[in-house]
Image: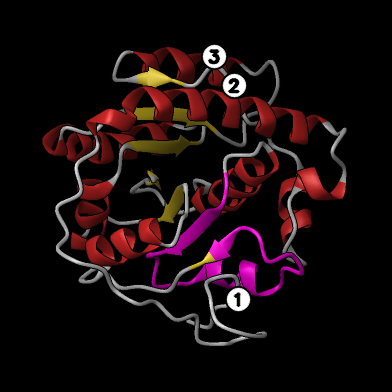
Amino acid sequence: MRVLAIASQKGGSGKTTLSGHLAVQAERAGAGPVVLIDIDPQGSLADWWNERQSEAPAFAQTTVARLTTDLEALRGQGFKLAVIDTPPAITVAIQSVLSVAELVVIPTRPSPHDLRAAGATVDLCERAGKPLIFVINAATARAKITYEAAVALSQHGTLAPVTMHHRTDYAASMIDGRTVMEVDPKCKSAGEMEQLWSYVAGRLERNFRRTVFNAPGHAAIAAPRPRGAGGFGRKAAL
């Protein structure tokens, strides 16, 4: 099972939106079954997932202390990809997530504050020996600051070749638990997300054999608000 972490010290960088969209696009591209994990205490990703009509991607409720063991359990259940949303702070939670991730995506808005904040997350990735990808998020098309952000980020790590532009359809689609690909698969935002997932998938495939899981045994995970019989494909309540 591939493990993808979305991390950034800066609040408002778009981690939750990116987590949900990448997970849905992975399912649409045939990389599933996919499971989402929300480590952020705010629970925004869980709230979005609770609004979804579709059972895919699945959602697993866990804690930082159980994360490694629960990932092993999910792997045993047949999940092919776990996407983990993290809190906007440098905490033990982020360190725990990075320890099990194969690849870390750092969404960064093209602003001086976001660029400065990215350094702390980069330091954690380097100490954990984990590969990272910067994704410029909520960018203004043809703006000078977007170009300058791309130059600055590329000096400190790998920059995704796809820029995510600022469009209201990203936020609007998530109001009722959907994504831009599900609302309008032919829109520009959907095209950006398809390209981004294609790039991320390639990087995950390249890094897959480097992943080491050290958790002993397996753990049972139960989604607390069932909608039918057992399994992972149910609504979560955090």
Q: Looking at the picture, how far across and down is residue 219, in whole percent?
A: 29, 73
Q: Amino acid at mark 2?
A: Val
Task: State which quadrant residue 157 falls in.
Answer: top left
Q: Amino acid at mark 1?
A: Arg
**Is residue 165 among what the camera can see?**
no
Magenta part of the protein: which range? 32-58
**Does residue 27 lie above or below 236 as drawn?**
above
User: Residue 16, image x and y in percent?
Assistant: 53, 55
For the residues carrying marks 2 and 1, which lies nearer the camera in this image?
Answer: 1
- The residue tagged 3 is 147
Structural distance between the alpha carbons of marks 2 and 1:
32 Å
The reply to whether residue 107 is visible in this rendering is yes
* Mark in the foreground, 1 or 3: 1
Q: Residue at x 62, y 36 (%)?
A: 138
Question: How far apart in space, not on screen, are marks 1 and 3 (Cα)?
Answer: 42 Å
Answer with left or right where residue 10 lies relative to residue 224. left
Q: Mark 2, residues whose alpha carbon is within 10 Å: few (<14), some, or many (≥20)? A: some
Disc 2 target residue:
162
In front of the other: 218 or 63: 218
